[in-house]
Image: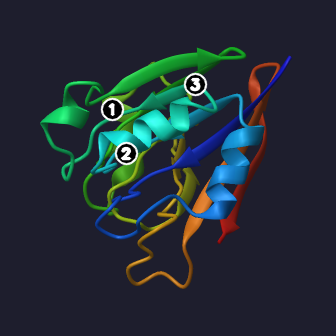
Amino acid sequence: MTTRLLVISDTHIPGRAKRLPDAVERAVGEADLVIHAGDWVAASVIDALEAHAPVLGVHGNNDGPDVRARLPEVARRTLEGVRFAVVHETGDAKRREVRMDAAFPQVDVLVFGHSHIPWDSTTPRGLRLLNPGSPTDRRRQPAHTMMTVVVDDGALVDVRLHEL
């Protein structure tokens, strides 16, 4: 069995955008699961995504009580034998790989957000770190971004960063 993921973070709706970009809405329709690494800002974004696909998400530092009441600080799920965790913030990029190896020893893939900077690296232990950037607030990045991931038979077989 193959599981298709849409990975997003830092949507900041309605502060940075009135709604999700068209490319994100199309990708939601093709996803088996949406992973969102926090800073939704409006709980209505959770509802909009859940109308099209299951959501695995966490709250971020910009999320209010309505989002925090619905989502944890850390979320975990095993998909196709791959152990995922989701958090909003991992701290400074310096030594991130070493810190996350220690913080998430029983995880294969850690999805995070907060920085709005796309990230795809592997720690010394083999933990895959993914940050999809932001589809609505690129900050100092050249483009708005999101990721798609395909999980099949215990492995990530396709990880793509998409510029919007």
The secondary structure type at the circle numbered 2 is helix
Which amino acid type corresponds to the residue marked 1 in the rendered image? Ala
Q: Secondary structure at mark 3?
A: loop
Three-letter code for the amino acid on which mark 3 is drawn: Pro
Q: Nearer the viewer, mark 3 or mark 1?
A: 3
Q: Is residue 144 above or below residue 111?
A: below
- Residue behind mark 3: 54
User: In this figure, which residue is indicated by the disc labeled 1?
Assistant: 102
Q: Residue at x 44, y 52 (%)?
A: 9
Horizontal and vertical percent for residue 35? 53, 37
**Residue sitting at x 41%, y 46%:** 112
Quarter location, residue 15: bottom left
Crowd tier of the residue under label 3, counting other residues whose Cα lies within 10 Å: few below 14, some 14–19, many 20 or above: some
For the view shown, which residue lies furthest in the left direction? 65
Which of the colour schemes (rainbow, by chain, secondary structure, one colour) is used?
rainbow
Image vertical order of residue 32 relative to residue 149, above or below:
above
Looking at the image, which residue is at 37% across and 45% down? 98
Residue type of the residue flagged with mark 2 = Val
Question: Can residue 100 be spotted in the picture?
Answer: yes
**Gap between marks 3 and 1 measured at Cα:** 29 Å
Residue on which the image places disc 2: 98
